[in-house]
Amino acid sequence: MDTAWKSRPDLSDLQKRIGIAVELVKIYDAGDKPRVDLKGSYGYRDINYIDASRGDGQVWSAGVFLTFPFFDGMRSRGKTAQAKSDLSSLKIDEAKLKDSIALQVRDAVNACREAEEIVKAISGTVRQAEKLLYMAERGYEYGVKTKLEVDDAQLSVIQAKGNLARARRDYSVARVTLDWVLGTVGEKTNK
């Protein structure tokens, strides 16, 4: 389960959006707090024809500014409340997604087990059908069985092998589905 939670890109995206929402709550909460800004500028000024006493040259300025919003119409509190609500919604979405992933993992694991057991069972059926075909061919050689019984045994072998191929395909699909659910599709694993 932890592997799926760490590897799934949709959950990772949601967790990053939660992190952004947490920062937005902090930013909006600071909207009605005092601020201290340091501002500076540097540049060049051309000749001022109106005031001849001032000439051209380099100009710079620097300052420390204190701003305190006395009343912003409750805008900061409203934005903070909205950001907290958005954060709560994202956390609920995260919990729902984790539950969904857990269910998907359980279903995929069960599908893999079921497909594996079906492959084992049908492999036994193929062995039995091949054994019956061998016995029918020997019986035909000795005149105990008819050609129809041999053909029927051959058909049973072909059907059993077809079922086995389908079961193996279903098992492969179940494995790929499990890898997708775990978020490990495309990663090389040593088994």
Image (cartoon, grey):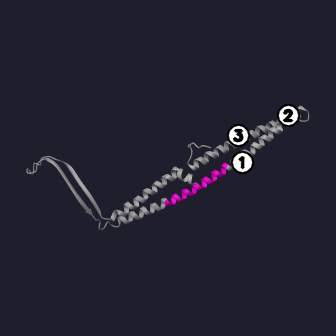
Rounded to the nearest angstrom, the CA distance separating label 2 from label 1 is: 30 Å
- On the image, the x and y values in percent for residue 109 come to 64, 51
Label 2 element class: helix
Residue at image point 56% right, 52% down: 3
Q: Residue at x 56, y 54 (%)?
A: 2
Please name the amino acid that badge 1 sits on: Glu
Q: Which residue is mark 3?
A: 165
Question: In the figure, is residue 50 to the left or right of 88?
Answer: left
**Residue 62 sits in quarter:** bottom left
Which residue, given by chain and number where applicable, does mark 2 sit on?
137
Q: Residue at x 76, y 39 (%)?
A: 159
- Three-letter amino acid code of the residue under disc 2: Glu
Over which residues does the magenta segment extend? 91-112
Mark 3 crowd level (few <14, some 14–19, many ≥20, 10 Å Cα): some
Task: Give the residue at the far top of this rendering.
Answer: 141
- Report which residue position mark 1 lands on: 117
Label 2 vs 1, first from the N-terminus:
1
Magenta stretch: dominant secondary structure: helix
Q: Is residue 92 magenta?
A: yes
Which of the two labelled residues, at mark 2 and mark 3, occupies the earlier sequence position? 2
**Residue 60: x, y in percent?**
19, 51
CB atoms of marks 1 and 3 within 8 Å: no
